[in-house]
Amino acid sequence: RQMCIRDRHLRRMADKKETVRYAYVTDRNGVLVGYLHIEDLVFAPPTAKVGELMRTEVISVDVDMDQEEVARICKKYDLDVIPVVDGTGRLRGIITYDDVMDVLSEEADEDIQKISALEAIDISYFQASIPLLVRKRVVWLAVLLLLEAISGTVLKAYSHALEAVVGLAYFIPMLIGSGGNAGAQSAAMIIRELAIKGEIGLKDAFRIFYKELSSGLFLGGILSFLAILRAVWLVGNNAALALTVAFALVAVILIGTMAGAFLPIIARKLRFDPAVVSGPLVTTLVDVVGLAVYFEIAKLLLHIS
């Protein structure tokens, strides 16, 4: 008879509950103390007590926890439902797998827009008005324009080097483009890691430094070989200029990978969104620094005073 009553109760709950895979157990004050799988109830002896069947190691989240952190916990522990409790431990509700997927999709959309230096737009592109699209884009474009203008200042400062060796100008787009692309790749990988782990500690930072240093050297070495071929094709048999381009490319690739790897980490530590500092911002910063490094290497190897 107890089994029949329990079955009828479960059937009544099925139409009202978002999920019936788990049953959460609270004390008389509503404090979460455990949970049961529904099959534990269905196949338990009719005389078994809930306290004997329930599992007390419950993974829960606080009502004030950021939704992205909740999604990260669900992914870490492979949960399709997680209970929500308040500061006193009382059960306030549950979050299911489809809720988590909605959050992950929302956060991914927001990060994609920020990576492209675009303020988040909550509605469809086709629903957005032209003034809204302009407003969401103009701020970052203006910031990047001002930062990119520093490149002109760098070029002006090294104009004597360009006048001495005109061939240096041929390789500027290739160098800054390669450094920016390498930085954007590193930033994308680190932002993904931050999304999975949440935080990156000192030990992980040393591992990242080693990996990006090694990767940057290998990538720079491979690309510098291609750059030498390009230099020979453009300016002929000018070994000094070809070596200048090769060494500068290795340096710029290293700058790009390091900037792309550590700027998101620094942003997270400063409570900024890591996605904001990736993509165009990393590329712009690498452009400015890369130009200065290129001309300094040129001055050294080409003996430009």
Image (cartoon, grey):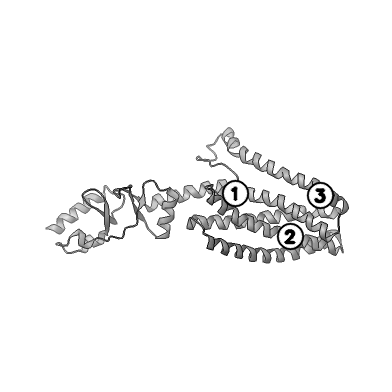
**Which quarter of the figure is the C terminus placed in?**
bottom right
Q: How far apart, in angstroms, are the residues tagged by discs 1 and 2?
A: 23 Å
Instruction: Tell me which amino acid carries mark 3.
Output: Tyr
Mark 2 highlights which residue? 249
Quarter of the rendering containing residue 170: bottom right
The residue tagged with tag 2: helix, strand or loop?
helix
The residue tagged with tag 1: helix, strand or loop?
helix
| Residue for point 57% across, 63% down | 206
- Taking depth in this image into account, of 195 and 272 the one nearest to the observer is 272
Point out the residue furthest to the top here.
Answer: 131
Residue 129, compared with residue 295, is above or below; it is above
Instruction: Tell me which amino acid carries mark 2.
Output: Leu
| Residue for point 53% across, 40% down | 121
Q: How far apart, in angstroms, are the residues tagged by discs 3 and 2?
A: 18 Å
Say which label, 1 or 2, has the lower sequence index. 2
Mark 1 highlights which residue? 277
Quarter of the rendering containing residue 60: bottom left
- Drawn side of residue 20 relative to residue 121, left or right: left
Q: Position of residue 33 (x, y in %)?
A: 26, 55
The residue tagged with tag 3: helix, strand or loop?
loop
- Drawn side of residue 159 relative to residue 136, left or right: right
Residue 158's disc number:
3
Residue 23, compared with residue 229, is above or below; it is above
Point out the residue furthest to the left here.
Answer: 1
- Taking depth in this image into account, of 23 and 124 the one nearest to the observer is 23
Nearer to us of marks 1 and 3 is 3
Say which label, 1 or 3, has the lower sequence index. 3
Contact, CB < 8 Å: mark 3 with mark 2?
no
Residue 276, compared with residue 194, is above or below; it is above
